[in-house]
Image (cartoon, helix red, strand yellow):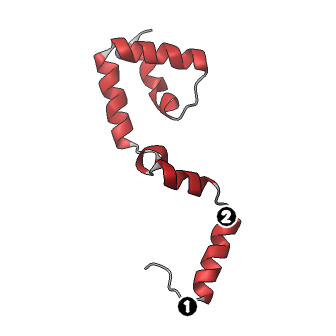
Amino acid sequence: MRCETALPWLVALQDDQVTTAWRAALLRHLHRCPSCRAGERALRAATPRPERVIPARWRARLDGLTVASLVAVGAAHEAAGAQPPA
Ligand SMILES: [Zn+2]
């Protein structure tokens, strides 16, 4: 794989929007290519993903939340007299 092919796919790779075979090909290229590897690292640093910044034990709890449950929590806080954050 050439850099011109790999670079446009780095965002899709990070978002896990590539097939297993294409992912393997991209990862092989990144393994061999310091330039694309640096680009991938810079892209990752510029676009933090929840899975990287939220600890796993919190993510497990957040995954179970729905909009309805968040609205219910907000209503309960409001009923208790809590003010929303400014
Ligand atoms: Zn490359």
* Image quadrant occupied by the C terminus: bottom left
Residue 42 in view (yes/no)? yes
Q: Which mark is residue 67?
A: 2
Give the farthest residue toward the right. Answer: 68
| Distance from mark 2 CB to nearest ligand 1 atom below 8 Å | no
Q: Nearer the viewer, residue 61 or 10?
A: 61
Q: Nearer the viewer, residue 21 or 65?
A: 65
| Distance from mark 1 CB to nearest ligand 1 atom below 8 Å | no
Residue labelled with disc 1: 81
Quarter of the image for residue 81 reads: bottom right
Residue 5 in view (yes/no)? no
**Numbered marks: total:** 2
Residue 1: x %, y % from top left: 45, 8
Q: Secondary structure at mark 2?
A: helix
Q: Is residue 80 above or below residue 29?
A: below
Which kind of residue does numbered mark 1 sit on? Gly
Residue 28: x %, y % from top left: 43, 13
Which kind of residue does numbered mark 2 sit on? Val
Q: Is residue 23 above or below residue 84?
A: above
Disc 1 or 2, which lies upstream in sequence? 2
Quarter of the image for residue 47 reads: top left
59 relative position to 41: left or right: right
Q: Is residue 40 above or below residue 51?
A: above
Give the farthest residue toward the top. Answer: 1
The local crowd at label 2, few if under 14, some if 14 to 19, many if 20 or more residues have their Cα within 10 Å, is few
Quarter of the image for residue 65 reads: bottom right
Residue at (41, 45) in percent of width and height = 48
Residue at (58, 57) in percent of width and height = 61
3D distance between C-alphas at marks 1 and 2: 21 Å
Q: Nearer the viewer, residue 50 or 5?
A: 50
Residue at (57, 51) in percent of width and height = 60
Q: Secondary structure at mark 1?
A: loop
